[in-house]
Image (cartoon, rainbow, N blue to C red):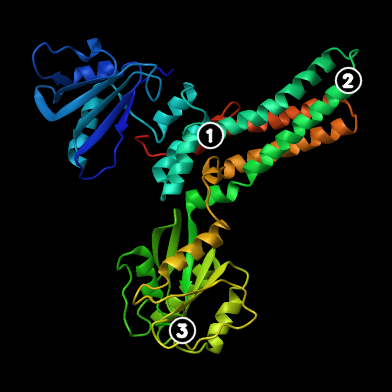
Amino acid sequence: MFDDTITAIATSIGEAGIAVIRISGDDAIKVADRCFSAAGKGRLPLAEAPTHTIHFGWLMRGTRRIDEVLVSVLRAPRTFTREDVVEISCHGGALPARMVLETVLANGARLAEPGEFTRRAFLNGRMDLTQAEAVADLIHARSELAVQAATAQLSGGLSSRLREIRDELIDPLAHLEAHIDFPDEDIAPDTRIEMGLKLDRALCRIDALLKTSREGQILRNGIRTVIVGRPNSGKSSLLNRLLGQDRAIVSPIPGTTRDTIEEVANIRGLPILFVDTAGLRIAESEIEEEGIRRTREVRDRAELILHVFDGSESLTDEDVKLLDESQDKPSIIVWNKIDLSHRAKLPSDINAPLVEISCLTGQGIEALKDAIKDVVWSGAIEAEAVDATINARHQEALRRAREGTLLAKGSLDRVESMEFVAMELRIAIGALGEITGQTTTEDLLDQIFSRFCIGK
């Protein structure tokens, strides 16, 4: 528990129906009591209010009413931070919320740091570190699958998988520690075999989690998908179709798009960052030349490329060159304008999915979305695929846990000194503890919680 009381606006700044100011700490209720005046007969001070109750009244600054509010009183330990918590619901809007916050600060609270509420929840044992990270993932989720993955992690899905791995390592370590303490007692051959099986099972579980790293990256960060092609091939029209809105200007005049346009769309549950680019051709002006330079730059950083061609025209040498330049990246060939006569023919040496569409009529757009999902996800999306997805921090710690477990298994198989086996297992278990927060450092916590908004 902490000896100070913190506060912050917990909702987004801007015009809205309500805003919520959260207070947490030993003096949370006292701070709120100093600036709250309850309405109605038989009103009680907040200090005497039962836990998990809501009270109507006014937020006061001296004798002046700041706003009409609802105040929720939540007493420890059944709160988000496991401290006393008060949440003040006032009218939405940047000014009312700021005035309420300033009043609370003037009555004894201090402004919370980014992620400090969730950090206190972690440090007070309300959740482990993977669940705390899931709070940020849930806030920043950009697709339904990302929400599903974050919710599963917040509910302890990843923590449960990590506990299973840890249990497989703890039991052999206990046997080894006992053997080290009492060296006269040899480890029976069948016990040694069982220990090896446990380490094998732990390795299988670690490998299964490591395989989710790509899925986790996709769900958290999305896939950068660049739309390229010659002018007037239909790139901007395709972007508008995929977004379901007129985001890019569409014109029959070549070279309309001079800069890159970026928008995120939810494609079959996956967050896809689409980048519309300037048409690739010999530039006719300095501005167009700069747009083409930027197109090549974003294409080189793309994770997926949509090559858009005018299917009513034959491919040019420049088209084939563009395809060749992107052979090392996942790509989809998009024949546009299939509502017109079809003349284009794909070179035989191009190995990429081909989808025929019409941006004018919308034909083939759903098939293109399926193709994007298949290329990104490499197959059907199943529920278990998002039940436990790791991030880059988890991946690095799991790799160290895997290395330690492998070394321990090798030493065990070679009947080497039990001290070596135990040492490697301690390293593996310690790496797992870093993921959940059982073993961690202040610098790591600062790094993780700095990604949070101030109100969370």
Question: Secondary structure beneath disc 3?
Answer: loop
Taking the spot 39% from the left edge, 79% from the top edge, the residue there is 287
Taking the spot 42% from the left edge, 88% from the top edge, the residue there is 341
Q: Is residue 296 visible?
A: yes
User: Could you say where residue 367 lies in the image, as x and y percent from the top left?
Assistant: 46, 67
Residue for badge 2: 188
For badge 1, the amino acid type reads Gly
Query: Looking at the image, do the residues carrying marks 1 and 2 touch, with CB atoms under 8 Å apart?
Result: no
Question: Alpha carbon of mark 1 to alpha carbon of mark 2: how far?
Answer: 36 Å
Q: Is residue 433 visible?
A: no
Left or right relative to 352: residue 230: left
> Is residue 428 placed above or below 207 in the rendered structure?
above
Question: Which part of the image, by quadrant, shows the N terminus?
Answer: top left
Question: Alpha carbon of mark 1 to alpha carbon of mark 3: how far?
Answer: 47 Å
Taking the spot 58% from the left edge, 51% from the top edge, the residue there is 214
Q: Residues within 10 Å of mark 1 (few under 14, many from 20)?
A: some
Residue for badge 1: 157
Question: Alpha carbon of mark 2 to alpha carbon of mark 3: how far?
Answer: 72 Å
Question: Secondary structure beneath disc 2?
Answer: loop
User: Could you say where residue 132 lies in the image, as x and y percent from the top left?
Assistant: 47, 33
For badge 3, the amino acid type reads Gly
> Is residue 247 placed above or below 117 in the rendered structure?
below
Viewer-proximal residue among 446 and 166 = 166
Q: Tell me which corner region of the image, top left, top right, bottom left or bottom right, holds residue 92.
A: top left
Viewer-proximal residue among 202 and 27 = 202
Q: Residues within 10 Å of mark 3 (few under 14, many from 20)?
A: many
User: Could you say where residue 231 lies in the image, as x and y percent from the top left?
Assistant: 42, 82
Left or right relative to 256: residue 292: right
Q: Tell me which corner region of the image, top left, top right, bottom left or bottom right, holds residue 9.
A: top left
Nearer-N-terminus badge (2/3): 2
Question: Which part of the image, by quadrant, shows the C terminus?
Answer: top left
Q: Mark on residue 311?
A: 3
